[in-house]
């Protein structure tokens, strides 16, 4: 069956990628498991605003599409948006269309090259010193406290400080960046965007703030990422205003949100799998390997998308040119064909590094090394200081069909 031949709607059960309620408690793994067994290449009927699309839940299908730049493009959308987001201001849509995530090669590689040196091992040596200092200061600030709201008081602190330092954002604006990040990912959440007008205003505020910094760096370049964006050239030409605003907001949001969410996810996971937490406390040398397992188990990004350039097959299902394909990372990361007992957290899992969390191919996450570094250093310090922490109640998530960003994760630090 192709989308064009689907006159009736095949059952999607209780799963609807366009409905943020499906992700209210994080990844709906029961639905993923059912779909992977029964409809691994799922027809989704779309909506009044959006055409139908396909949904992938098998690891190998997701990996194959991610690596296949001949048959699939990112330039027609890197995610399946909710209907609400489809109504955002045109300027926002123009900027999103110029994210690196929405670029194909060779354009993607040219943009990536402007900032990639900062994320290479040599560039991260200096960053590691800064991260260690931030972690130590964070632990000192927690001294004497009995409880904390993990997301805002712990998880967000170091990633925001790190990306602000790399980009060249003033330290006094760090919490403004926290608000900006919530605006990017919270456009479907009434707590962050009670109306579409407010969602647009908050998003456009990011562009205005970024443009001020970019203009300042054109006048006075510094050794930071904003200067690289402001003064960078592609094929000898400077980046346009939309490209610069897009680049700024892309780096800002991607540079801290998934790391803070993964940190929160780690604390949640280790509260559910207490034996695994005890293993890490008894042997901290296991933590570097455990980071990949946590990234697999938690999977901070719900989905990415591609569009077929030409007629192609995915897992034996024909997909026609122009049809969209959504890749569910959490489903792929819990595929039992790849990961034994996939819903269990195993901090010594031998193949945990095969996870899809950072993507595959040329879109592999630019900041993956930095994310892993921060996760490792913060977990080492936090578990050493607070081995007996307890969750006070289950996490609350931002309403989104794109990222598993937590709003709240209150914990007792001493159990």
Image (cartoon, rainbow, N blue to C red):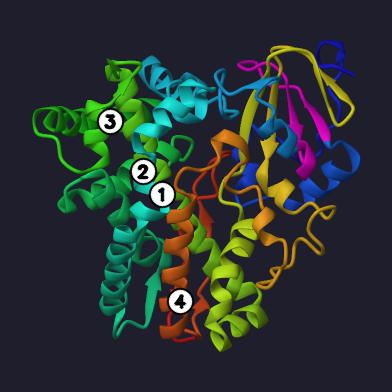
Q: Earlier in the sequence, mark 3 or mark 2?
A: 2
**In-front residue for pair 242/34:** 242
Marking on residue 358: none
Which residue was labeled with disc 2? 117
Q: Is residue 206 above or below residue 161?
A: above
Q: Tell me if 35 is positioned left or right of 380 in this view.
A: right
Quadrant where the N terminus sits is: top right
Which residue was labeled with disc 1? 120
Q: Would you identify the image quadrant in which residue 198 lies?
A: top left
Q: Are marks 4 and 2 in contact (CB under 8 Å)?
A: no
- Distance in Å between CA atoms under marks 3 and 1: 17 Å
Residue drawn at (71%, 31%), measured in percent from left and top? 65
Q: Is residue 399 magenta?
A: no
Q: Are marks 2 and 1 in contact (CB under 8 Å)?
A: yes
Q: Which is in the foreground here, disc 1 or disc 4?
A: 1
Q: Is residue 373 above or below residue 61?
A: below
Marking on residue 380: 4
Is residue 394 in view?
Answer: no
Q: Secondary structure at mark 3?
A: helix
Q: Which is in the foreground here, disc 3 or disc 2?
A: 2
Which residue was labeled with disc 3? 229
Please rate how many residues cluster around mark 3, counting C-alpha atoms within 10 Å: few if below 14, some from 14 to 19, many from 20: many
Residue drawn at (35%, 17%), measured in percent from left and top? 91
Q: Which is in the foreground here, disc 3 or disc 1?
A: 1
- Distance in Å between CA atoms under marks 4 and 2: 27 Å
Q: Are marks 3 and 1 in contact (CB under 8 Å)?
A: no
Query: Which residue occupies the extreme front position in the image?
Result: 122
**In-front residue for pair 329/148:** 329
Q: Which residues are magenta?
A: 41-61
Q: Tell me if 359 is positioned left or right of 370 in this view.
A: right
Q: Earlier in the sequence, mark 3 or mark 4?
A: 3
Q: Are marks 3 and 4 in contact (CB under 8 Å)?
A: no
């Amino acid at each position: 069956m192709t989308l064009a031949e689907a006159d009736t709607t095949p059952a999607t059960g209780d799963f609807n990628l366009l409905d943020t309620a499906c992700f209210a408690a994080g990844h709906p793994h029961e639905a993923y498991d059912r779909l992977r067994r029964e409809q691994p290449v799922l027809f989704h009927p779309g909506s009044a605003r959006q055409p139908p699309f396909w949904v992938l839940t098998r690891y190998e299908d997701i990996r194959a599409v991610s690596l296949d730049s001949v048959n699939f493009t990112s330039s027609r959308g890197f995610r399946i948006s909710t209907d609400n987001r489809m109504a955002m201001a045109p300027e926002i849509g123009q900027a999103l269309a110029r994210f690196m995530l929405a670029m194909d090669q060779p354009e993607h590689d040219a943009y990536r090259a402007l900032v990639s040196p900062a994320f290479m091992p040599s560039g991260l040596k200096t960053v590691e010193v800064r991260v260690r200092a931030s972690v130590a200061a964070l632990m000192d600030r927690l001294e004497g406290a009995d409880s904390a709201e993990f997301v805002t008081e712990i998880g967000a602190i170091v990633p925001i400080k790190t990306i602000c330092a790399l980009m060249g954002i003033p330290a006094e604006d760090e919490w403004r960046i926290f608000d900006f990040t919530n605006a990017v990912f919270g456009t479907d959440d009434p707590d962050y965007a009670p109306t579409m007008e407010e969602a647009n205003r908050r998003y456009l505020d990011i562009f205005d703030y970024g443009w001020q910094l970019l203009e300042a760096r054109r006048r006075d370049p510094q050794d930071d990422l904003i200067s690289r964006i402001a003064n960078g050239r592609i094929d000898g030409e400077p980046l346009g205003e939309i490209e610069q605003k897009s680049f700024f907001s892309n780096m800002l949001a991607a540079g801290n949100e998934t790391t803070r969410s993964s940190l929160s996810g780690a604390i949640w996971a280790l509260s559910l799998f207490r034996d695994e937490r005890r293993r890490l406390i008894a042997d901290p040398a296991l933590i570097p390997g455990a980071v990949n397992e946590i990234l697999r188990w938690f999977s901070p990004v719900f989905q990415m998308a591609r569009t077929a350039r030409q007629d192609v097959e995915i897992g034996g299902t024909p997909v026609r040119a122009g049809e969209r394909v959504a890749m569910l990372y959490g489903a792929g990361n819990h595929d039992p064909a790849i990961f034994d007992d996939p819903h269990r957290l195993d901090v010594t899992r031998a193949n945990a590094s095969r996870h899809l969390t950072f993507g595959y191919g040329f879109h592999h996450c630019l900041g993956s090394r930095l994310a892993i570094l921060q996760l490792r250093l913060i977990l080492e310090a936090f578990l050493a200081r607070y081995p007996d922490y307890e969750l006070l109640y289950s996490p609350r998530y931002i309403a989104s069909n794109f990222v598993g960003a937590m709003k709240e994760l209150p914990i007792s630090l001493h159990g």
